[in-house]
Image (spheres, rainbow, N blue to C red):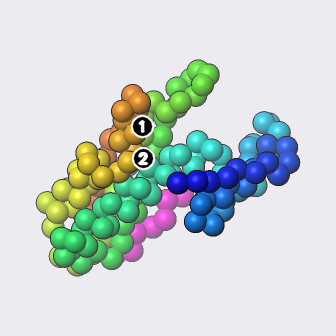
Amino acid sequence: MKARVKWVEDVMFVAESGTGHGIVLDGAPESGGRNLGMRPMELMALSVGSCSSYDVVTILRKARQKISRCEAEVTAKRVDATPAVFESIHLHFKVAGEDLSAKQVERAVQLSADKYCSASIMLKNAGVLVTHDFEIVTGAVQAAG
């Protein structure tokens, strides 16, 4: 895997993946940025949420669950020190679908946490407390805001 991070100006960067996708990263104005992109640690927290979400959806589909929505609410806490590494990350999954089995959803979340999600397992192995839970919701799942 290869990627490139290019400095644009001030504390703004453009990160490009080896597959040709890009994202803007920037700092807050008090840090010399213009708030035009995500912070690097936000991106890291989202990496954990998206990696685990990918697993949950894939596992549920393989289990022939009729999943229609999956949303992971990510709550990350950082230590009050330098470096301000993650202390904990919690993933709360909101899953919707037709006749979903709570047992299958629980199994999918657990398999992601314990076996498949490289991002969360890597952070867990570095001492970050990574926890997961879920709920099965009916109707539309609202975007986290």
Residue toward you, 1 or 63? 1
Residue stretch rendered in magenta on the structure: 140-145
Q: Give how far across and how far down residue 109 sits, in percent.
A: 26, 54
**SS type, badge 1:** helix
In the image, is 106 to the left or to the right of 85? left
Name the residue type under label 1.
Answer: Leu
Q: Which mark is residue 123?
A: 1
Residue toward you, 20 or 26? 20
In the image, is 93 to the left or to the right of 50? left
Name the residue type under label 2.
Answer: Ala
- At x 73%, y 55%, the residue is 14
Q: Give how far across and how far down residue 26 sits, in percent.
A: 74, 48
Q: Is residue 123 magenta?
A: no
**SS type, badge 2:** helix
Q: Which mark is residue 21?
A: none
Q: Which residue is mark 2?
A: 119
Q: Is residue 19 above or below residue 4?
A: below
- At x 25%, y 73%, the residue is 61
Q: Give how far across and how far down residue 7 sits, in percent.
A: 79, 48
In the image, is 86 to the left or to the right of 111? right
| Predominant secondary structure, magenta span | loop
> Which residue, as the protein is rendered here, is positioned at the far right?
9
CA gap, disc 2 and disc 1: 6 Å
Residue 138 visible (yes or no): no
Determine crowd level at label 2: few under 14, some 14-19, many 20+ residues with C-alpha closer than 10 A: some
Residue 60 visible (yes or no): yes
Q: Give how far across and how far down residue 23 sits, in percent.
A: 66, 59
Q: Are marks 2 and 1 in contact (CB under 8 Å)?
A: yes
